[in-house]
Amino acid sequence: MAARKCILLLVICFIACFGQILGQKTSVPLVINTWGFTNATEKAWTALRNDGSVLDAVEKGCTECEAQQCDFTVGYGGSPDEHGETTLDALIMDGTTLDVGAVADLRRVKNAISVARSVMEHTTHTMLVGEQASAFALEMGFAESDLHTHRSIEQWIAWNNKKCQPNYRKNVSPDPSKSCGPYKPLNPADWKETPSYSPHSDEFDHDTIGMIVIGANATAGGSSTNGALHKVPGRVGDAPIAGAGVYVDSEVGGAAGTGDGDITMRFLPSYQAVEYMRGGMAPEKACQLALSRIGKKYPNYHGALVCANIKGEYGAACHWPGLDKFPYSIRNPTVKSTTVEQVDCQQ
């Protein structure tokens, strides 16, 4: 009898430890990213399956979006600024070391996420910006190229012909609602009450790719974007800011976002969501609570988060007036191909 009990205990232990072998599905590794950018998801998954690291997967996935110009809000040829120039922001983060590499206002170099990784791996800095970021990229062997396309030039010309409407200026002269400038600041006594307003308010104006990759023993995250359409030159959003656009910690999991970056960076929702998960909160609830803090202060805020923990559990949340559902892409061992899921948006 004792021998039978011993054998039974061994079988139970085997099932608990190696249930995957007996047909139990595991949800790690996991790739999850904002929007229905499934080619990026699949590229990251392929990198993992080819024995790439979680950092490799993030880089490959975001690079795919940059090359495909996902919704023209990632990569070259999109979101021209007031001068008609396309500039790029990107970040990559190692959840084990918490090392971060980022570039902002990158010019004339297409490979933003790869340049960000070079910042992480070949400097002790976290972020490089503007012309100096471009110079660093050339030092690292990246090619210089024109980020304009016929589409982006035509987009800028059409905006300019509409007296530069809409734009992001306020408390300046001439009246920015009627003029392209050049602008000068108004005296404070002449300032007008300006409503909280996002001039580019549909989903196609905030399509940053934010990606989280959960491996068996490591996590990584990344983001890439060409920023806000017709932005003031030099503007940087949340995508290259650790804790705002992306945050990962291999003890917990990760979160990544998309939306109105000027508001998002004031709240660090990706970091906040990870901390909620650290306390035991489920990923979807963590996403919801992190966004609710923003919505209370800015009811018209447009943004969404994807969250995942190290067990491979994941979820998303959306606060986006005018958008019914927010799509996001996932790939793990439980699905045969990349799947697009949706979450209802809080209005």
Image: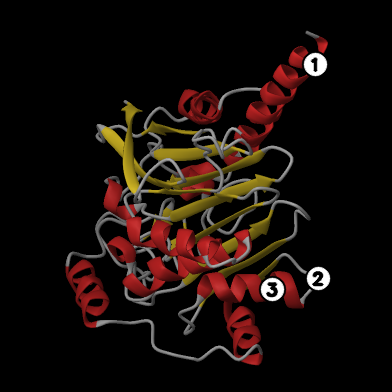
**Residue 10 shown left or right of residue 194 in the figure:** right
Q: Does residue 299 sit above or below 145 in this rendering?
A: above
Q: Does residue 66 sit above or below 18 in this rendering?
A: below
Q: Mark 1 or 2 closer to N-term?
A: 1
Query: Which image quarter is the N terminus in?
Result: top right
Disc 1 residue crowd, few under 14, some 14–19, many 20+, Cα 10 Å: few
Q: Position of residue 149 (x, y in %)?
A: 27, 82
Q: Residue at x 31, y 50 (%)?
A: 36
Q: Mark 1 or 3 closer to N-term?
A: 1
Disc 3 residue crowd, few under 14, some 14–19, many 20+, Cα 10 Å: many
Dot 1 and dot 2 residues touching (CB under 8 Å): no
Q: Residue at x 32, y 28 (%)?
A: 344
Between 60 and 88, the one lying in front of the other is 60
In the rendering, which numbered label is found on residue 124? 2
Dot 3 falls on a residue whose secondary structure is helix
Q: Position of residue 284 (x, y in %)?
A: 49, 28
Provide the residue designation for mark 3.
119
In the rendering, which numbered label is found on residue 3? 1
**Residue 200 shown left or right of residue 269 in the figure:** left
**Residue 280 shown left or right of residue 312 in the figure:** right
Whole-angstrom CA distance, mark 2 to mark 3, is: 8 Å
